[in-house]
Image (cartoon, rainbow, N blue to C red):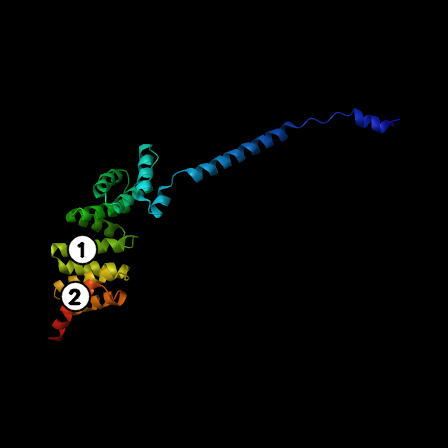
Amino acid sequence: MLNRLQKRLLQKKPRPRAKSDTIVKKSFSTVLLLFLAFTLFAQTKPDAAKEYKAKNYESAVDICLAEIKADKYTVDTYNILLWSLNRQKRYRETITYGQQASKKYRDMRIIESMGVAYYYLANYDRALSSFKTYAAALPEGSFIDDVYYFMGEIYIRKGEFNNADIALTTAVHHYPKSAMWWARLGYAREQAGSYEAALTAYDQALSINKNNAEAKGGRDRVAPKLNS
């Protein structure tokens, strides 16, 4: 026979679960589902910057244009778009979207990208204006070496060799590892009649790349003039 305590235990009803326990568990489940959904979205959302770094420039352009069309763009959307267009030599499109971006943002990266596009479209005056604007605003900017290189090339094309010397000297100051830039500096100095300085630049180019044809030719032209 069951004793009194055993009977009481058998007759005891289970305690109902507190409402707060249910709410906490439901809240936790909701937060977990939202986190998983966000993580999945982040993994599948197209990333223009990632595509650009992977050199998938066409894909980067498509993503950026989709963001602009959906009105979900940022200044980086436009910058990645312009960089990708320039990489594909779609310079006229760079100008079109660059002008559009300039109405929304005052960002020197946009100005620099447009300068590059103008340069390759042989619109040297506008290119020079863009590069000067960048250099004045960001004298230590990320693209300052390229900016001064392009300025030097423009001055060479204009026959302003002293200005080209100044621009290219600044370019190699910021980035001294380019044999081509040193060779172009040597050429600018040679054309300006600064033969000793030209020889120094040509020699520097050859110290970086002994096979640089422009530096070799320039040195062969300049050295005899210094020894005569």
- x, y (%) of residue 154? 16, 53
Q: Is residue 66 visible?
A: yes
Foreground of the two, 223 or 175: 223
Is 224 left or right of 113, judged from the image as shown?
Answer: left
Query: What residue did someone put label 2 on?
Result: 218
Query: What residue did someone put label 1 on?
Result: 153
Q: Which residue type carries mark 2?
A: Gly
Residue 222 found in image quarter: bottom left
* Label 2: which secondary element: helix
Q: Earlier in the sequence, mark 2 or mark 1?
A: 1
Residue 100 found in image quarter: top left
Which residue: 27% across, 39% down? 101
- x, y (%) of residue 10? 80, 26
Q: Is residue 107 visible?
A: no
Which residue: 12% across, 54% down? 158
Q: 10 Å neighbourhood of mark 1: few (<14), some, or many (≥20)?
A: many
* Label 1: which secondary element: helix
